Image (spheres, grey):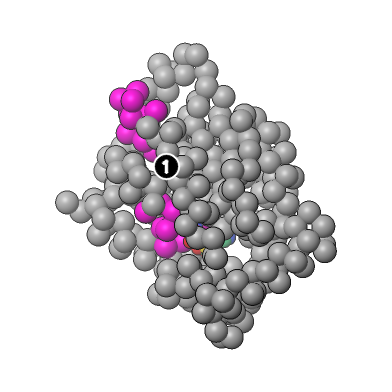
Amino acid sequence: MDVARAFDAVAGSYDEARRRLVPCFDEFYGTAVEVAEPALRAALAAGRTPQVLDLGAGTGLLSSLIAAAVPESRVTLLDAAPKMLAVAAEHLTARAVAHRVIVADLVDPLPSGRYDAVVSAVAIHHLDDAAKRDLYRRVAETLTPGGVFVNAEQVAGPTAELDRRYHQVWLSQIAARGSDADEIAAAEQRMAYDRPAPVDEQCRWLIEAGLVDVDCFFKSWRFAVFGGHAPDLPDARAEHRGREGGSDDWWSYQR
Ligand SMILES: C[S@@+](CC[C@H](N)C(=O)[O-])C[C@H]1O[C@@H](n2cnc3c(N)ncnc32)[C@H](O)[C@@H]1O
């Protein structure tokens, strides 16, 4: 079973388990929204519709939180698991969020258009390190000037000993939150696909990709939120105006 099928198999129960399996859920996702929000508000202030690309969007948890913070946003959700995206589309339609879903692999070319925020949560660690670095380069190219990339991610410990400690802490935290043996076993099975990298290394790759103001904004053991901005060019707004992220026809609304 590949990673997309592993997530599609749990699409119906995925959301319900998240708060147990991500023990710092509110700070983790909340920080990602805080990092993304100013760039979306800047797009609004410039008279544009804020465009968001969510990589490995799954059931749309992060997209939903971003749309709740900046309801004018249009969200493109990309994932290799169609059943996860079907759950996301249902949630976003119910909340009247303008969105489109794209079934694709993170190693495929990114959808055309320029994005004010490229966001991702607990997905990119499924790629090997070379593919992560390549994705970060492509993300940097798809951002509007001043646009933001934020990755709320499971990261590796900087040493093997610390990585073991991250895992022990996670196991005891999720057990304390009520994960039973079956849920823990299923999560560990999906973790066979994980290829996490340390946060400082990933921040270096973002700088290499051309992002600025790169930082780790939140970290609790294995869970880290990091990212950076595309440089803001002085004439960026004028240049960007003609290149908004696509026409209106593929956006799903429910009013
Ligand atoms: C742990 S879930 C996270 C979903 C969502 N971002 C969230 O915060 O709940 C990981 C998601 O990444 C997707 N994924 C993993 N590897 C991928 C790849 N190479 N290409 C596209 N999607 C991938 C999986 O299908 C799954 O939906």
Label 1: state its secondary structure.
strand
Q: Which image quarter holds the N terminus?
A: bottom right
Residue 7 in the image: state x and y as whole percent: 51, 70
Quadrant of the image occupied by residue 52: top left
Q: Which residue is drawn at 52% across and 50% down?
A: 120
**Dot 1 amino acid type:** Val
* Within-10-Å neighbours for mark 1: few <14, some 14–19, many 20+: many
Is 12 one of the magenta-colored residues?
A: no
> Can residue 39 be seen by looking at this rendering?
yes
The residue positioned farthest toward the top in the image shown = 235
- Above or below for 143 versus 235: below
Of the pair 162 and 145, the residue shown nearer to us? 162
Would residue 28 be found to the left or right of residue 98 on screen?
Answer: right
In the image, 10 versus 17, the foreground residue is 17
Q: In this view, does 27 lie to the left or right of 237?
A: right
Q: Which residue is drawn at 51% across and 71% down?
A: 20
Q: Between 92 and 156, which is closer to the camera in this rendering?
A: 156
Q: Which residue is drawn at 47% across and 73% down?
A: 17
In the image, the segment drawn in magenta is: 42-64
Quadrant of residue 209 within the rendered picture: top right
Q: Does the residue labelled 1 lie within 8 Å of ligand 1?
A: no
Q: Residue at x 53, y 54 (%)?
A: 28
Asked whether 208 or 111 is in front, the reply is: 208
Mark 1 sits on what residue? Answer: 52
Q: Is residue 170 left or right of residue 5?
A: right
114 left or right of 184? left
Residue 79 in sight here: no
